[in-house]
Amino acid sequence: MTTTAPTTAPAYDTEEIQDAGHVDVLIVGAGVSGIGAAHHLRDEFPDRTFVILDAQDNRGGTWWTHRYPGVRSDSDLFTYGYRFKPWRGPSIAAGDAILDYLDEVIKEDGLEQYIRYQHRVTAASWSTGDRRWSVEVTRDDTGQRLRFTTSFLWMCQGYYNHAKPYRPQWDGMDRFQGLLVHPQRWPEDLDLAGKRVVVIGSGATAATLIPAIAAEAEHVTMLQRSPTYYFAPPTTHELAVQLAPLDLPDEWTHEIMRRQYMMQFHWLARTSFEAPDELHAFLIESMRPLLPEGFDIDKHFTPRYRPWQQRIAMVPDGDLFASLREGKASIVTDTIETFTEHGIRVSSGEEIPADVVVTATGFNMSVLGDVAFTVDGEPVDFTERVTWRGIMINGVPNMAYVFGYFRHSWTLRVDLVSDLVIRLLANMQDKGATMVVPTLRPEDADMQRRPFSDPENFNSGYVMRSQHILFKQGDREPWTHMIEHEQEREILPKADLDDGTLVYR
Ligand SMILES: Cc1cc2nc3c(=O)[nH]c(=O)nc-3n(C[C@H](O)[C@H](O)[C@H](O)COP(=O)(O)OP(=O)(O)OC[C@H]3O[C@@H](n4cnc5c(N)ncnc54)[C@H](O)[C@@H]3O)c2cc1C
């Protein structure tokens, strides 16, 4: 491999592409998914060669990109952690602790030597004649262009563009004299002492950031167009408290806590479909005692959608509500009319003064890392393709991707998808096949194409904004995805890899 960063970057001719060699499996992304995929690959196929490419200059994906104050998981770390690596901390963890956990996996599996940072994959071309992918890469540090070849491409690129966060344009933004910040690009030296801060947004990021900066800032206003569901679980689960004195092996505690949280989240997901009104009432009423006396809960905390149609934002130990009770934070629910020189005016006419405006407005989704795919010289238009079990794409050979759960911990799916990919590689080996392509059967030819996400099921803003660039799903297995973990943990391990929808050659 010729990809170690030189200390002084030479100037490269950007037209020239250097051969970076061949690997059996090429993993794109060194986040939770890519590191998990590499673990399973090493475990099951220790002799296969592989490399992990990531555009960023460090590991962790999401947890490296997002380093704003207070950044933490929404999920418990027993299910957000891998099945194979016990989590030893409190249920909800700070971003740093998650990076430490990933570092331990990297170290224990000896993965560091296989990761190439600042390697941005720009194009991937499959050749049936050669039975391999040719993967084009640009090094963000040197500008050098490289070409890897691989027999199997494992896309672990996450779901959003790490370089370009989503920020809507509002009237008057250019005349605002304060500082505009996006949580995806948090300035390391930002001093909020004595500053009036407005955080635009109502999702998990806003809920996390506000209590973390409220003590330092003069005041923080959460400005939301519409409310989100919140739930305030304890940072440490009461079952973990009970288990602590028993001095159990870490593996046992990890497994017991995983099962506990899975059961809890399965209940939550099921109830959101079967008894949405009861769940709505439960979530609203559980917030009431945590809010200041007389707080307008209908206006600020009563969403217009069914619970779980968008992610429920977790507020561990109710820290957001404590900031509201202490008067360090407040909420305005209204639409932005215009930015002014010194703040934001909303439709009611109220002007909210601001020295700093944080746009916690979310992501731009990206389709498979914005890589330009071709198969035998034909560009792949993903909007015309359907997913195979949320793991492969019809007509795209030897490529799997990882997309985690929306309503459950992302990582639960990393382990399940990895198991299936490993089974698939073993099946190819047994058959002596060098190629596997998800292919619509004759009976699937007229299958109804459904959007990536049915808005009735899940309709978060970032998904709805991106439906037009995303691949589709069909109306039957195995051409569907976004199946709840409770069902999928049964379905995927038993999925028939010889049902005619995967063609081996
Ligand atoms: C602040 C925040 C909190 C979250 N909390 C939770 C939570 O509590 N629970 C939960 O389940 N989910 C949570 N999520 C969702 C989170 O994104 C996933 O849980 C998970 O981290 C995704 O991991 P990943 O490895 O698939 O992708 P990412 O973390 O997005 O990492 C993908 C990596 O691939 C790289 N990459 C992408 N395209 C290319 C390319 N073309 N070439 C080279 N490299 C590329 C990127 O640089 C990145 O480093 C949260 C998201 C955010 C932003």
Image (cartoon, rainbow, N blue to C red):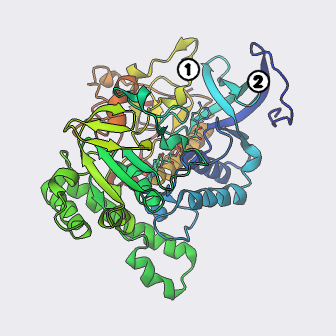
- Horizontal side of 449 relative to 399 (left or right) equals left
Residue 130 can be seen in this image: yes
Q: CA distance from mark 1 to mark 2?
A: 18 Å
The answer to the question of whether label 1 and label 2 lie on touching residues, with beta carbons closer than 8 A, is no
Q: Nearer the viewer, residue 259 or 292?
A: 292
The earlier-in-sequence mark between 1 and 2 is: 2
Quarter of the figure with residue 1: top right
Label 2 sits on residue: 144
- Horizontal side of 411 relative to 407 (left or right) equals right
Q: Position of residue 192 (x, y in %)?
A: 51, 52
Q: Which mark is residue 125?
A: none
| Callout 1: CB less than 8 Å from ligand 1 | no
Label 1 Cα crowd, 10 Å radius (few <14 / some 14-19 / many 20+): some
Residue at the location (48% across, 40% down)? 182
Q: Secondary structure at mark 1?
A: strand
Q: Position of residue 263 (x, y in %)?
A: 33, 65
Q: Tell me if residue 190 comes above or below residue 323 in the rendering.
A: above
Label 2 Cα crowd, 10 Å radius (few <14 / some 14-19 / many 20+): many
Q: Check the picture and name the quadrant holding the C terminus.
A: top right
Q: Secondary structure at mark 2?
A: loop
Residue 452 can be seen in this image: no
Q: Position of residue 327 (x, y in %)?
A: 32, 63
Q: Amino acid at mark 2?
A: Gln
Q: Nearer the viewer, residue 93 or 399?
A: 93
Q: Residue furthest left?
A: 277
Q: Residue furthest bottom?
A: 245
Residue at the location (28% across, 28% down)? 450
Q: Tell me if residue 489 comes above or below residue 254 in the rendering.
A: above
Q: Position of residue 231 (x, y in %)?
A: 30, 61
Q: Nearer the viewer, residue 24 or 73?
A: 73
Label 1 sits on residue: 372
